[in-house]
Amino acid sequence: MAINKSAALGTEPIGKLLIAQAVPASIGILVMSLNMVVDTIFVGQWIGPMAIAAITVVVPLTFLIASIGMAIGVGGASIISRALGKDDQDKAQRTFGNMIVMSLGLAVFFVVVGLVFKEEGLALFGANGDIYSPAEIYYVIVMYGIPFLALCMTGNPVVRAEGKPKFAMVALILPAIGNIFFDYLFINVLDMGMAGAAWATSISYFICFLFIYWFFISKYSELKIKLRCFKLEHAIVREITELGGVTLARQGMVSILSIVLNHTLFAYGGETSVTIYGIISRMLMFALFPVMGISQGFLPIAGYNYGAEKLARVRESINISIKYGTGLALLIFAVIMIFPEQITFIFTKDETVIRETPNALRWVFLVTPLIAVQMIGAGYFQAIGKAIPALLLTLTKQGFFLIPLVLILPTYFGIFGVWVSFPIADVLATLVTGWYLNREVKRTLR
């Protein structure tokens, strides 16, 4: 018999709930981010700076495909949260079955397309000069694991929607530990180079898949893998697509940003600038893990209580999440501003990269304390099923501000124009998101 904890999302104090949801999510994101950081350290120290540049090019391309699973997971989890809030177990179960079919089918299709058009994809994402050869090796092997990653990204938000954040945390921790172990074995011990790094990554995806699969066939899950629910239903598929399209658009915009950044950085600073951004991009995910955890913990709480029509609790969850997220972001900001040189030295021994990265790192993280408003604001609309506002707010930073700034400012300021684009985009996106969220709260949650 499943252990039902989803009802607690509508009864327990918001602060307690948020901590219970956010801490496991934060730990999971921390370990996953640490895994990416360690992966970058290993290839940078044991293979060389071109390996960091190669991974910087490949990861956005492979994650664009895997993000199909993430989009289906987040979109479907929003439906499941609200269905559980309304005590509609049947809809939650049917939604889950549809999610599995959609994720696996689409991921396999796009992996095949990605392998057929390998050269075109790598060139598009910035595999220029000496970066291409290691990028090709890494890309082909990692693609074999992408269907498993897509299913993991589909299942993890559902685990959180059931009110089981600790299991969702373990699903992130296990593959991270596995990847670090196999990185060491394949790269340092067996001297397999980029191929070793790629196989370690693919194996880690499979480890995550095995744990997610076990969870949904165990007594701990309220939802089960049932063949009768694999029949696609138009209404459910449409709602998943509308809400998941927000996440897919976000990742798609991140991928477009990566294309623009990689080509701009290569044009103005060569392979070294691409390597510098590779370090910064890892730090963006690693350092911000507590704020991301707050955002992930917020989603099922807001979705469940909105479905249960407990609007005061929804409003309280927004306020507390922004307060906690901003406090954590301030701590992150202080660490980055004080220790950029020490952070850079961890990744590489290349003197040019060590000399140029700290200043870039400070500029990119300059307005970090503002990001909680962006994350919670966009997440709120996704949690309650309002796809269009969620989509627009999700695209605000990268799409409406950062990409145009990266295209324009370097023509006047060179590489500095790239780095200063990040804080400007953050300020503008926070102003837009804050205004829109405040207006919506006054209209619908009072």
Image: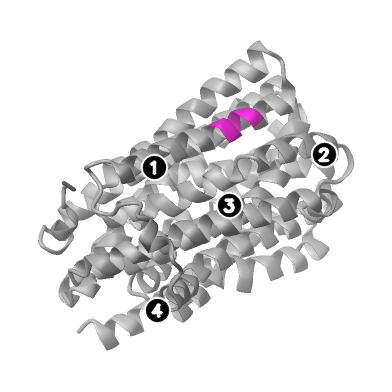
Residue occupying image coordinates x 30% and y 41%: 167
Q: With 256 as the anchor, is 84 left or right in this view? A: left
Specify the segment rendered in magenta. 199-203
The Cα–Cα distance between marks 1 and 2, rounded to whole angstroms, is 35 Å
The tag on residue 386 is: 4
Q: Nearer the viewer, residue 428 or 2?
A: 2
Residue indicated by mark 3: 66
- Name the spot of residue 282 as percent of width and height, x first: 57, 41
Mark 1, Cα crowd under 10 Å, few <14 / some 14-19 / many 20+, is: many
Q: Earlier in the sequence, mark 2 or mark 3?
A: 3
Which of the marked residues, 3 or 4, is nearer the chain's N terminus? Answer: 3
Looking at the image, the residue that sits furthest to the bottom is: 443
- Identity of the residue drawn at 70% across and 41% down: 276
Marked residue nearer the N-terminal end (4 or 1): 1
- Can I make out residue 388 in this image? yes
The residue under label 4 is which amino acid type? Answer: Lys
Q: What is the CA distance from the residue labelled 4 to the residue labelled 2?
A: 41 Å
Q: Is residue 303 visible?
A: no
Alpha carbon distance from label 4 to label 1: 28 Å
Q: Which residue is mark 1?
A: 212
Q: Is residue 73 magenta?
A: no
**Three-letter amino acid code at disc 1?**
Ile
Q: Residue furthest right?
A: 129
Question: Residue 131 bears which disc, if any?
Answer: 2
Q: Is residue 388 above or below residue 192?
A: below
